[in-house]
Image: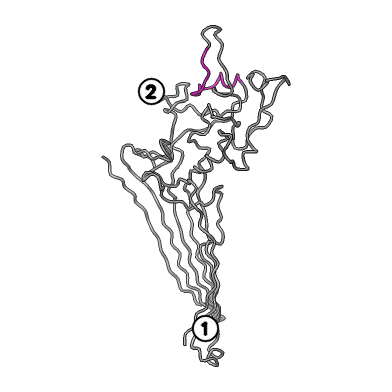
């Protein structure tokens, strides 16, 4: 077995800056770089049940996301026939020699075309199967950082603490379930209204069952396929559709305090009186579409990192404080 090597570099610096107007700023900022090197020959990570969502192989990221790459949406029968054969490609009728197209059981217009990346011999073979799975990104950030600053001006004190990651990917596993459109009874995200929608070329009864008489009237946003119960083309398979940028900057803690002057508190027999107010998790700047980009290790598999399976987001908390000493 090959040992896992995870070299990283950490830079930490603290500063005390004196300013005029009786102000003092205490800064602490930290920057950590991450780089994963060699790993064991092969380690699979599972999302739920038998869904392989990550793979660790020599030369790749530890627990790197693993799946298919989407090319685009199929636009016609000819498009399907002239493309690498999907796993749900229709069988040939032994009597007529025609392909048995069925919108509920075979690949159809509006389904996803996946990239033919490899085959049993390590080269594209015109067939879409497990050999076409590949690495889709690393859950590890290029670097993570933190910035903590306390600014004091006379009797006021402002503390700001920010954290973040940059360069990591997140698998939106819960988003996959809530936008799959494969079940008539499951609630779905509003974004499925931007799915691929089919319509007739010629308005006749049962047009939707004739692959020669269907066309796309609305192309799905970001390669969102058609809605179909059962998902015969397996459009929901783990693919780069669900891999998102997990970089973020979070205002983790902000607090403001006021120290009442001693000339005032001494009249009340109080040595120190401090009033404060603060908020935790005020705001997060991120492109991630899920609830919270700060995910971490999976709760279902020890070999998965950065998988969002509906983890409860960090709550925003408001606090007020009163500190009195006699």
The N terminus: image quadrant: top left
Q: Residues within 10 Å of mark 1 (few under 14, many from 20)?
A: some
Q: Position of residue 4 (x, y in %)?
A: 31, 45
**88 is higher (above) or lower (below) than 134:** above
Q: Position of residue 253 (x, y in %)?
A: 51, 65
Q: Nearer the viewer, residue 10 or 299?
A: 299
Image mark for residue 285: none
Q: Nearer the viewer, mark 2 or mark 1?
A: 1
Residue at numbered disc 2: 121
**27 is higher (above) or lower (below) than 245:** below
Residue at numbered disc 1: 273
Does 77 sit left or right of 159 as displayed?
A: right
Secondary structure under tag 2 reads: loop
Count numbered badges in the picture.
2
The residue located at (45%, 35%) in the rendering is: 67
Colour setup of the view: one colour
The residue located at (48%, 66%) in the rendering is: 148
Q: Label the magenta part by its dominant secondary structure.
A: loop
Q: Position of residue 267 (x, y in %)?
A: 55, 93
Q: Nearer the viewer, residue 249 or 235?
A: 235
Q: Residues within 10 Å of mark 2 (few under 14, many from 20)?
A: few
**185 is higher (above) or lower (below) than 319:** above
Secondary structure under tag 1 reads: strand
Question: Which residue is most to the left?
Answer: 1
Q: Is residue 79 magenta?
A: yes
- Start-end of magenta stretch: 77-92
The residue located at (47%, 72%) in the rendering is: 26
The residue located at (43%, 59%) in the rendering is: 31
Going from N to C along the chain, the mark reached first, 2 or 1, is 2
Q: Position of residue 124 (x, y in %)?
A: 45, 24
């Amino acid at each position: 077995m090959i040992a896992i090597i995870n070299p990283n570099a950490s830079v930490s610096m603290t500063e005390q800056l004196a300013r005029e107007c009786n102000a003092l700023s205490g800064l602490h900022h930290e920057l950590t770089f991450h780089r994963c090197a060699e790993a064991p020959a092969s380690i699979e990570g599972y999302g739920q049940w038998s869904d392989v969502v990550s793979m660790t192989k020599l030369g790749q990221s530890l627990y790197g996301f693993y799946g298919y790459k989407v090319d685009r949406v199929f636009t016609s029968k000819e498009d399907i026939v002239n493309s690498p054969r999907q796993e749900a490609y229709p069988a040939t009728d032994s009597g007529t020699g025609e392909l048995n197209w069925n919108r509920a059981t075979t690949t159809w217009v509006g389904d996803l075309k996946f990239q033919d990346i490899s085959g049993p011999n390590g080269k594209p073979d015109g067939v879409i199967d497990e050999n076409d799975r590949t690495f889709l990104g690393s859950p590890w950030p290029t670097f993570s950082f933190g910035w903590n600053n306390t600014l004091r001006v006379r009797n006021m004190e402002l503390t700001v603490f920010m954290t973040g990651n940059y360069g990591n990917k997140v698998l939106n596993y819960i988003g996959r379930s809530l936008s799959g459109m494969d079940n008539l009874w499951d609630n779905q995200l509003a974004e499925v209204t931007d799915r691929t929608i089919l319509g007739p070329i010629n308005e006749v009864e049962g047009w939707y069952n004739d692959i020669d008489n269907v066309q796309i009237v609305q192309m799905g946003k970001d390669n969102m396929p058609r809605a179909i119960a059962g998902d015969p083309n397996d459009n929901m398979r783990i693919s780069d559709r669900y891999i998102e940028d997990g970089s973020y900057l979070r205002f983790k803690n902000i607090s403001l305090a006021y120290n009442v002057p001693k000339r005032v508190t001494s009249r009340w027999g109080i040595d120190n009186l401090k009033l404060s107010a603060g908020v935790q998790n005020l705001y997060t700047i991120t492109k991630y579409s899920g609830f919270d980009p700060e995910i971490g290790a999976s709760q279902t598999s020890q070999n998965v990192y950065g998988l969002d399976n509906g983890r409860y987001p960090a709550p925003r908390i408001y606090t007020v404080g009163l500190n009195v000493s006699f």
